[in-house]
Amino acid sequence: SALSFRRYDEVIAIAGEGRRAVGERPMLRLAHAVALSELGELEPAEELFRQGGGAEAAEAPALIAYARHSLRTRELKRAEQSAEAALRLVPDDQNGWALLGLAW
């Protein structure tokens, strides 16, 4: 998935093209936000997460991505809440437990 893709510069280009071509789609916006955050572009990533795919996400990978981003922005309570929400969906997710531990 794009959430685990490590060539973030390419993800940004593809997600941007896709958003221009087909309009706003939650998965494209999320992929774009994750890639920006992973590259340290925290403010534009934050804006995309706020538009959707952040705290209100319904899938564990999106919540994990938001928890990671929240740690980067030093929003520890938000990181904790996102990791906990992900763990409610997938209780044995090692990433969720690791992120929760960091947020505490």
Image (cartoon, grey):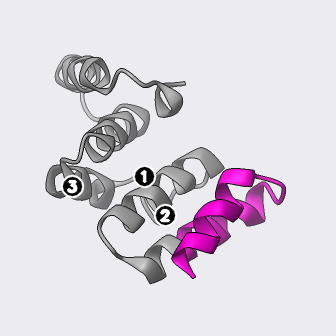
Query: Of the residues tagged 2 and 3, which is closer to the observer?
Result: 3
Q: Quadrant of the C terminus?
A: bottom right
For the residues bearing labels 1 and 2, Cβ distance under 8 angstroms: yes
Q: Is residue 9 left or right of residue 75?
A: left
Q: Residue 103 appears at what percent x and percent y?
A: 53, 76
Which-is-in-front pick, marks 3 and 1? 3
Magenta stretch mostly in which secondary structure? helix
Q: State the residue position of label 1.
A: 53
Which residue type carries mark 2? Glu
Alpha carbon distance from label 3 to label 1: 15 Å
Q: CA distance from mark 2 to mark 3?
A: 19 Å
The quarter of the displayed image where residue 11 is located = top left
Residue denoted by label 2 = 56
Residue reaching furthest to the right: 92
Q: Residue at x 36, y 42 (%)?
A: 34
User: CB of mark 3 within 8 Å of CB of mark 1?
Assistant: no
Q: Residue type at mark 3: give it.
A: Leu
Q: Quadrant of residue 66?
A: bottom left
Q: Is 88 contained in the magenta span?
A: yes
Residue at 36%, 76% in the rendered image: 75
Which segment did they paint magenta? Answer: 80-104
Residue type highlighted by circle 1: Gly
- Is 82 left, or right, of 5 in this rendering? right
Q: Earlier in the sequence, mark 2 or mark 3?
A: 3
Residue density around tag 1, few if under 14, some if 14–19, many if 20 or more, within 10 Å: many
Q: Residues within 10 Å of mark 3 (few under 14, many from 20)?
A: some
Disc 1 secondary structure class: loop
Which mark is drawn over residue 94? none
Name the one closer to the observer, 72 or 50. 72
Q: Which residue is mark 3?
A: 42
